[in-house]
Image (spheres, rainbow, N blue to C red):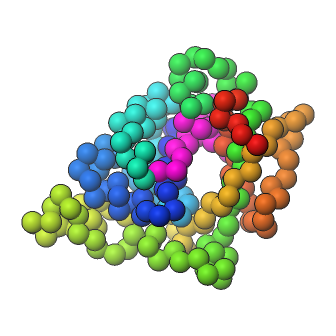
Amino acid sequence: MTRVCLLGSPEVNLQYELLSRETSRDALSTYELERPFENTLAVRTVSVGAAVSLLNDLQWYLVRFVDEAIVQEPSVSDTEWLSRGLAEALRNGEIHPDETGEFLKVYGLEAADAAVSAGTDTSTETGTEATATPGNAGRGETESETQAEPETEATGHTADRLVEPLYVRRTDGEIPEYDLRDVDDTLVVRLTEGEFSP
């Protein structure tokens, strides 16, 4: 299964913005929603083509509420993600999967408890509050009634946070170390050459 993950802009609550609007909520209604990282929303689709189609359907919302959309395709890598542009190039046959690993954007992954101890407010990201849905305000429906809250990767604690990305090139199969700050782990996103800006 191909995964799609939307990384929300820092100033918005991505879950609320997407699930409180009828068109985006309908586009996502057939998927089981996940929240692998803080202020993200992820789904599993059947193919890269389906992933790109879903992103195209959500384009209006991506421009307004999403910093980046990334795609994970098992036939390319089980651990690394693809930028939207690279996923489209793969779908269109413009690039071979073996040619996708050189240009990278590496995010730091900070544990939720570290973010809290550093003074980062994650309260708006939990999605546990019942927030009035604009399209249903007259009926008194709430967001929690119209769409289940996405699950985190590790049940039972707040989702970890992606922090500032580092642009690097893979050399001889090796990825340079992430050195922008101390982090618990990293998330690697493969880019097209045109998206690479070290």
Q: Which residues are magenta?
A: 66-84
Which quarter of the image is occupied by the C terminus? top right
Query: In the image, is 182 to the left or to the right of 73?
Result: right
Mark count = 0
Q: Residue 114, image x and y in percent? A: 67, 76
State yes or no: residue 10 in magenta.
Answer: no
The quarter of the displayed image where residue 53 is located = top left
Name above or below for residue 123 compared with residue 133.
below
**In the rendered image, is residue 150 in sight?**
no
Along the line of sight, the residue nearer the viewer: 59 or 46:
59
Along the line of sight, the residue nearer the viewer: 1 or 189:
189
Query: In the image, is 24 to the left or to the right of 189?
Result: left
Q: Which residue is found at the position 55% from the left and 40% from the top?
A: 71
**In the rendered image, is residue 172 in sight?**
yes
Along the line of sight, the residue nearer the viewer: 128 or 165:
165
Q: Which residue is found at the position 42% from the left and 64% from the top?
A: 13
Q: Which residue is found at the position 61% from the left and 38% from the top?
A: 82
Along the line of sight, the residue nearer the viewer: 181 or 156:
181
Q: Which residue is found at the position 66% from the left and 30% from the top?
A: 194
The quarter of the displayed image where residue 144 is located = bottom left
Q: Residue 146, image x and y in percent? A: 24, 60
Query: In the image, is 164 to the left or to the right of 67?
Result: right
Q: Residue 47, image x and y in percent? A: 48, 31
Query: In the image, is 65 to the left or to the right of 74?
Result: left
Residue extending farthest top: 93
Name above or below for residue 119 compared with residue 57.
below
Residue extending farthest left: 138
State yes or no: residue 78 in magenta.
Answer: yes
The quarter of the displayed image where residue 131 is located = bottom left
